[in-house]
Image: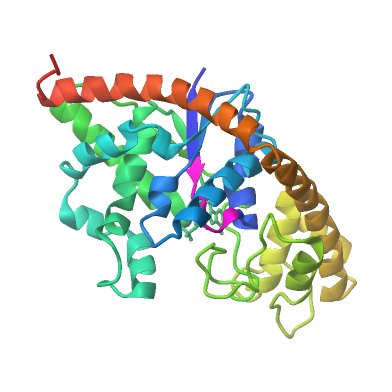
Amino acid sequence: RPVILSGMQPSSGSLHLGNYLGALGNWVRMQQDYDAYFFVVDLHAITVPQDPDALRAATRATAAQYIAAGIDPQQSTLFIQSHVPAHAELAWVLNTLTGFGEAARMTQFKDKSAKHGTDAASVGLFTYPILMSADILLYQADAVPVGDDQRQHLELTRDLATRFNSRFGETFVVPEAFIGKEGARIYDLQHPTAKMSKSAESDAGLIRVMDEANVTKKKIMRAVTDADGEIRFDREAKPGIANLLTIFATMTGRTTDSLVEEFAGGGYGDLKKALVEVVTERLGAIRTRTLELLDDPAELDRTLGAAADRANERAEATLATVYDRIGLLRRP
Ligand code: ATP
Ligand code: MG
């Protein structure tokens, strides 16, 4: 079976609607047809400052949300990135194969470092896409289901795989990005031209999986729209409404056209109310299940431990080949 792999950062302890609709929901649908590896990228999370205890709790909570959303840990390998040392080891090798200018072209670093100032940004944040390349190449993944914001990082991964293969001989599978059509990019409810992100400045535009229903309701009802009062899908002229329609469509599997048809007669309030129902019902179920799983951390840790063993086996095999190919002396 073809291999897929994907991960998310544990920051803040709750995934958001963009993570769910752009990535996690697709993972759940794909896991039957692929040999799937899903992991929580704690090593990526520390590229910005984290509180140690909060990070530990958020890492468990993120794994629990994967399961609660429908990832089956019997079927898929669900593990924690730092439990597999080969990620950091292969990242070092790939660092030596990446041009400085090549890394400097990554727009996510430019966006994120602009927020904190380049001096405050860590070198780890700069090399984030190289660690991500290592994550993917270690497992010989055929496809990587991610949101549209990861397109450029996937290109870098493909370039590095191709470069390594041509320099040292066929070693890595060159992975394809798998980017869903609907939900590939969910926008902030308050700034509907900026992607919904856990590192957003304000909380009001961010729907969290772990928010209580009344909080989610308030955020949706206060979502920024526009003054013309007409419900139609127009990303340019009406980004707020377009975003609400996209969320609705992706959640329900309906088309935005059919939603426009249904809601065209009414006001924005009716659309928002119906969306509140859809979103709170789905997220409520995930939240409840997550809290149950977190009630038994020992059981969750057993699941993660078994998966780490499987992941390590596959990753170590790739790393050993890489070390051999580049000429590192085998440990006697
Ligand atoms: P940050 O902004 O701090 O990078 P994030 O919200 O992008 O956080 P990540 O853990 O970096 O979260 O991303 C996890 C997955 O969620 C990736 O596959 C990414 O493409 C997807 N994703 C993130 N934000 C969105 C969004 N707004 N719409 C669709 N997919 C998204
Ligand atoms: Mg991100």
- Residue 111: image x %, image y %? 38, 68
Residue 259 appears in the rendering: yes
Where 303 sits versus 128, above or below?
Answer: above
Identify which residue, 10 or 105, lies in the foreground. Answer: 10
Residue 319 on the magenta span: no
Question: Which residue is depicted at the point 31% across and 31% down?
Answer: 86
Question: Which residue is depicted at the point 39% across and 24% down?
Answer: 312
Residue 8 on the magenta span: yes
- In the figure, is residue 246 to the left or right of 149? right
- Residue 322: image x %, image y %? 21, 25
Identify which residue, 326 or 85, lies in the foreground. Answer: 85
Q: How is the image coloured?
A: rainbow
Where 14 sits versus 60, above or below?
Answer: below
Say which quarter of the image contains residue 223.
bottom right
- In the figure, is residue 103 to the left or right of 112? left
Where 265 sits versus 151, above or below?
Answer: below
Q: Where does the magenta region start and end?
A: 7-13
Identify which residue, 207 or 264, lies in the foreground. Answer: 207
Identify which residue, 5 or 90, lies in the foreground. Answer: 90
- Residue 196: image x %, image y %? 57, 64
Question: Which residue is depicted at the point 54% across and 30% down?
Answer: 304
> How many numbered callouts?
0
- Residue 150: image x %, image y %? 44, 51
Q: Identify the residue at the far bottom of this view.
A: 227
Q: Quadrant of the C terminus?
A: top left
Residue 254 appears in the rendering: no
